Amino acid sequence: MHLIETGPGPGSGGGGAAGVPDPAGGPAAGPVARVVAVELRWLALHLAADHRAAYGREHRRPVVVARVAVELGSGAGAGAGAGGGEVSWGWGECAALAAPTYDEEHAGGAWAVLCSHLAPRLLGARVPAGDDLLSTLTGVGWVLGAVRGHRMAKACLEMGVADAVLRAGGRSLAATLGVEAASVPAGAAVGLPDDAGRAREEVARAVDAGFGRVRVKIAPGCDVEPLRALRQAFPQVLLQADANGSYSRDSARRLDALDELGLACIEQPLDPADLLGHAELVRRWRTPVCLDESVRDPADVEVVAALGAAGVLCLKPARLGGIGPAADAAARAAARGLGVWCGGMLQTGLGRAVDAAVSGLPGFTMAGDLGSPWPPFAEPDPFGPVPVAAGAAAVHRAAGVGPVPDPALLRAVTTRRWAARA
Ligand code: MG
């Protein structure tokens, strides 16, 4: 690995590409992509309006993005590093938030593990690059799999490789996944309704923008009364509540009153680990229980279904480790009759474009958090917003997983850079 420029430095113990087995393996017959460069950027973005959830109030929205270069070849020895093959670049986004409150991952930790462990493992690795994108994604997952957890960081590199391979072939993520829709239904999310007037205004703005479903954050002390008021003000709107795991089994008794409001679902009322507690709520409420933070791996879908711990799942490609694991999880959910929607992570237009394409898969049965009725960032989004009209988010149909950034806008918000070559 040749380091071009460092932020915190490559750190210790990544192992490097030289020690990583090659998933393209053996005398490969098909197209192969060899990862030859990874560049990371820290984008110092801020939310246009503070995001209020049970885990706190957020204003900073640092986003780590990766630019990945692959060298393409085919046949035995393809992409073996001799050079001369076509090089394609792709972009990936890490969804980790500023603080480890929604999830254990956070942007600073993701940066560290990307520089020190994940990028060094990916550099020099070869992955299949044929028509079957899932083979490419599986190959990346295999290369990074020796590192436990850190799914959002892994998803960033998976997205970057996928984008590079798709761009080289002139293919879109949506077309490759078999998603033919030009747009997919989108819902909107509003923060804790701790100010009744502001909450009503936010929901009205979402409804006026055409969103047919609105998700409202709740937390102990800010739950039944504001939701009841919103239900009375907007009787026709599909409402759902998201508690981000902020209730105990005892305090969740209070949420029994939400069962009268005809919500689409009540999301993650209990701690992510308390699947048995969620199963109790499934038995007690008519309203479907949705799990978000509890589902971290495609195999978790089977555990949730076996325990009867949810009727609906919020699947986020970023939280699951990427596009491949999300597609896998959605297929497992569909086979078990679970409703699925795609949650947002306050991403740029790049991450949202991936979510929109994935939301077109048949396993996704409900509107996802794919757009925003207002600009999400205080600064211009270097990747641009996902177009949303009449409650539907446009699916990116050009080559790659999503848009490329505007160079000037990207430069304006980049405060740290790290890059290395194989
Ligand atoms: Mg959630």
Image (cartoon, rainbow, N blue to C red):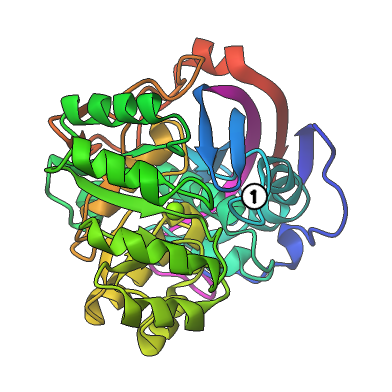
Q: Nearer the viewer, residue 411 or 189?
A: 189
Q: Nearer the viewer, residue 127 or 163?
A: 163
Prevailing secondary structure class for the magenta stretch in the rendered image: strand
Image coordinates for residue 393, horizontal then vertical, percent:
22, 36
Q: Residue furthest right?
A: 12
Q: Is residue 171 visible?
A: no
Residue at position x 51%, y 13% from top? 409
Q: Nearer the viewer, residue 117 or 254?
A: 254
Image coordinates for residue 93, horizontal then vertical, percent:
51, 40
Residue at position x 15%, y 40% from top? 183
Horizontal relation, residue 152 to residue 397: left or right = right
Classify 201 as above or below 282.
above
User: Per the image, is 45 magenta?
Assistant: yes
Horizontal relation, residue 329 to residue 299: left or right = left
Where does the magenta region start and end?
24-47
| Residue at disc 1, CB closer than 8 Å to ligand 1 | no
Classify 94 as above or below 220.
above
- From the image, tell me which residue sits under label 1: 101
User: Per the image, is 186 magenta?
Assistant: no
Horizontal relation, residue 261 to residue 271: left or right = left
Classify 306 as above or below 329.
below
Label 1's element? loop
Image coordinates for residue 141, horizontal then vertical, percent:
53, 65
Image coordinates for residue 147, horizontal then vertical, percent:
69, 66
Mark 1 residue crowding within 10 angstroms, few (<14) / some (14–19) / many (20+): few
Q: Residue furthest bottom?
A: 306
Dividing the picture into quarters, in which one does residue 258 lie? bottom left
Label 1 is placed on what type of residue? Thr
Residue at position x 74%, y 55% from top? 117
Classify 80 as above or below 29.
above
